[in-house]
Amino acid sequence: MPERKTYFNWSSGKDSALALYHLLRDKKYSVEYLLTNINRHHDRVSMHGLRTLLLQRQLDAAGIDYGWLELPEIASHEEYEATMSQKITELKEKGFEYAGFGDIFLEDLRTYREQQLDKWGMKALFPLWNRNTRELTDEFFDLGFKAIVVCVDAGRLDRSFTGREFDRSFIRDLPAGVDPCGENGEFHTFCYEAPYFSQPVPFEKGGTIFREYSHNGMKNGFWFCDLF
């Protein structure tokens, strides 16, 4: 059976990195493009706050062609869908049939992704779907991946978790109710070493920054560790 041309939605974090690892090992698919959402106002990865320069070095280490989905500082749902629609149309015209994601158990998000891709006759792939998140963290460590925590939800974790190495010690210190993979948005990471990287991505830690965002009349605060 010929390999199915696939693009992968790359977040720069650990779940994305591990999901790509499994997809690269599946000979039914040929991952030929990595797509990342970028906040063009801040020139950083959306949600994670990672500088685009570090993202580029990470993607260069992965050795797969890549590109951005550039979004405004605060993108409406309509703006996001219009930008995504244009990008998927471009990828479909280049022969891509499948899209990979690092989601684990958010059913509503999976359904949304599948419905959107179905408009273009494309299929969604979820290599980590429904796996135990504690087992996933053990696999991540055992395979030699390394990551640092770059963003935490201030409503769920305190500032001290920001900028920490994502390791077994970090997992042990998480409060009850916080998912080991941060699958509910509790924290986000930057993966700087992976089995398929040509080399680790060098970086330096900067300061810790607090930002507050409003959504549907509610405010949410996040701590970010700035990386250089």
Image (cartoon, rainbow, N blue to C red):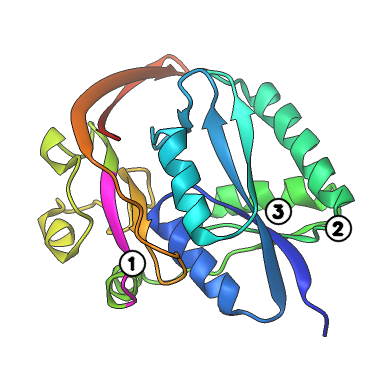
Q: Label 2 to label 3, Cα distance in Å?
A: 18 Å
Looking at the rendered structure, the secondary structure element under dot 3 is helix
Q: Is residue 57 magenta?
A: no
Q: Which residues are magenta?
A: 143-149
The residue singled out by tag 3 in the image is: 114
- Residue 62 x, y percent position in the rendering: 51, 60
Q: Quadrant of the C terminus?
A: top left
> Is residue 129 something one can see in this rendering?
no
- Residue 68 x, y percent position in the rendering: 62, 38
> Within the image, what quadrant is residue 25 found in?
bottom right
Q: Compared to 23, does 211 lie above or below? A: above
**Residue at image location 38% in from the left, 52% down from the top:** 183
Q: Quadrant of the N terminus?
A: bottom right
Q: Label 3 to label 1, Cα distance in Å?
A: 28 Å
41 sits to left or right of 82: left
**Residue at image location 35% in from the left, 53% down from the top:** 201
Q: Are marks 3 and 1 in contact (CB under 8 Å)?
A: no
